[in-house]
Image (cartoon, rainbow, N blue to C red):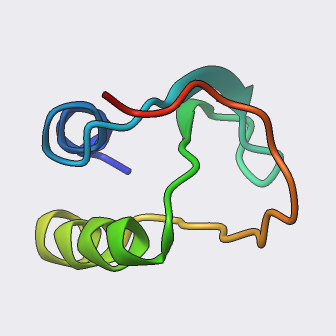
Amino acid sequence: SEHLDSSVDFVLHELHSGATLNEIIGAYDNTPRREMIAIVDKQEFKQLMDYIRKTDPKAFVTVYAVSEMRYMPKK
């Protein structure tokens, strides 16, 4: 996304969730990019997707179903 920083800010400060950023290289055009990985629940997912659709409708989004994870509970 061209607006990755605002999406990260949304995850951290609006959803009060965590995120991981990775430096990646797109294989199609060999362009360096940043990728955000965030694990959110169903309600947060809807909020995040609504936010991304508004701020950057062309953002590339991949969704995975997570069956198990270990984490520290949100405060």
In front of the other: 40 or 7: 40
Which of 8/25 is in front?
8
Q: In the displayed structure, does residue 36 sit left or right of residue 62?
A: left
| Horizontal relation, residue 9 to residue 26: left or right | left
Q: Position of residue 56 (x, y in %)?
A: 23, 66
Q: Residue at x 31, y 65 (%)?
A: 48
The location of residue 8, given as percent across then percent down, is 30, 35
Residue under the point 47% across and 77% down: 42
Q: Is residue 72 left or right of residue 58?
A: right
Residue 50 in the image: above or below residue 39: below
Please state which of residues 35 and 12 is positioned toward the viewer in this rendering.
12
Q: Is residue 70 visible?
A: yes
Name the foreground residue: 40 vs 2. 40
Q: Looking at the picture, how far across and down is residue 34, in whole percent? A: 53, 29
Above or below 44: residue 37: above
Query: Residue 74's quadrant in the figure?
Result: top left
Q: Residue at x 58, y 24 (%)?
A: 72
State whether residue 57 appears in this view.
Answer: no
**Which residue: 64% across, 22% down?**
22
Position of the C terminus, as image quadrant, is top left
In x, y percent, where is residue 59?
40, 65
